[in-house]
Amino acid sequence: MLKLHHLVNSRSQRILWLLEELGLDYELVVYPRDPKTNFAPPELKAIHPLGKSPVLEDGGRLLAESGAIIDSVVRRHGQGRLAPAPDSAEYDTYVHWLHYAEGSAMLPLILSVYMGRLGEAGAPLQPRISSEVKNHLGYIAEALEGRDYLVGNTFSAADIQLSFVLETAKHLGALARFPTIVVYLERLHARPAYQRAVQRSSSADLGGPGKR
């Protein structure tokens, strides 16, 4: 049985979505954020040394990091779904987007969030960070031009992985100049499995297990 340790409003939402897309049986444990700091609760530290989410238990193994979890789940449980064949021409493109989301695109967005909290103290860095945000969003928009999804115009786990980046950009009000991304994000959010994942997360007992 898979067991997902899920922090609300976090990267782990996409792992929950992945499990729903694949129709897998899993146990869900939902953790609330601290109402004052918005940080993860100390209970997650008992699950993994970093105290972060997502963390997935799978057959006695403890997996962390969204990209690594997605890669493992798709390989072990996907049965050929949500990823191109490893020997296909599209596989390297899939791997690129799977790692690009956290390896490159997420950093300027996270910095933008923190700089906003600093107010005037963060103002000197804001132009550079904003430029990088626009640079990455422009890159993503160009990749989506004329297509519905990132890899071979077929929905894959790479779309799931990138979704959190774009949701963060939307939260920051950075998507106004990128209608292609707005439509793409709406397309992702319309998927029944995405909506089931949101519903499960919001209806689960916080700190307690829920079974699919």
Image: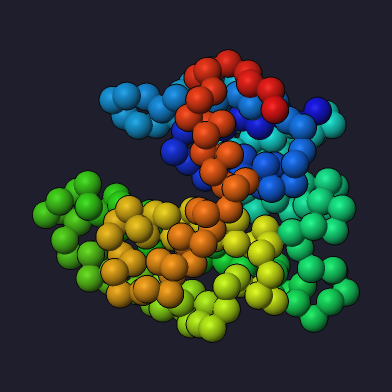
Direction from residue 207 to residue 81 in the image, left or right = right
Direction from residue 160 to residue 174 in the image, left or right = left
At 70% from the left and 76% from the top, the residue drawn is 152
**Residue 51 image point, x, y percent:** 54, 30
Direction from residue 14 to residue 18 in the image, left or right = right
**Residue 132 image point, x, y percent:** 36, 72
User: Which image quadrant is residue 150 in?
Assistant: bottom right
Question: Does any portion of residue 183 appear in the rendered image?
Answer: yes
Residue in front for this viewpoint, 141 or 191: 191
At 45% from the left and 25% from the top, the residue drawn is 32
User: Which image quadrant is residue 100 in?
Assistant: bottom right
All told, the count of numbered labels is 0
At 47% from the left and 61% from the top, the residue drawn is 185
Which quadrant: the N terminus?
top right
User: Which image quadrant is residue 120 in?
Assistant: bottom left
**Residue 82 image point, x, y percent:** 74, 59
Q: Looking at the picture, does residue 48 appear above or below residue 170? A: above
**Residue 21 image point, x, y percent:** 69, 48
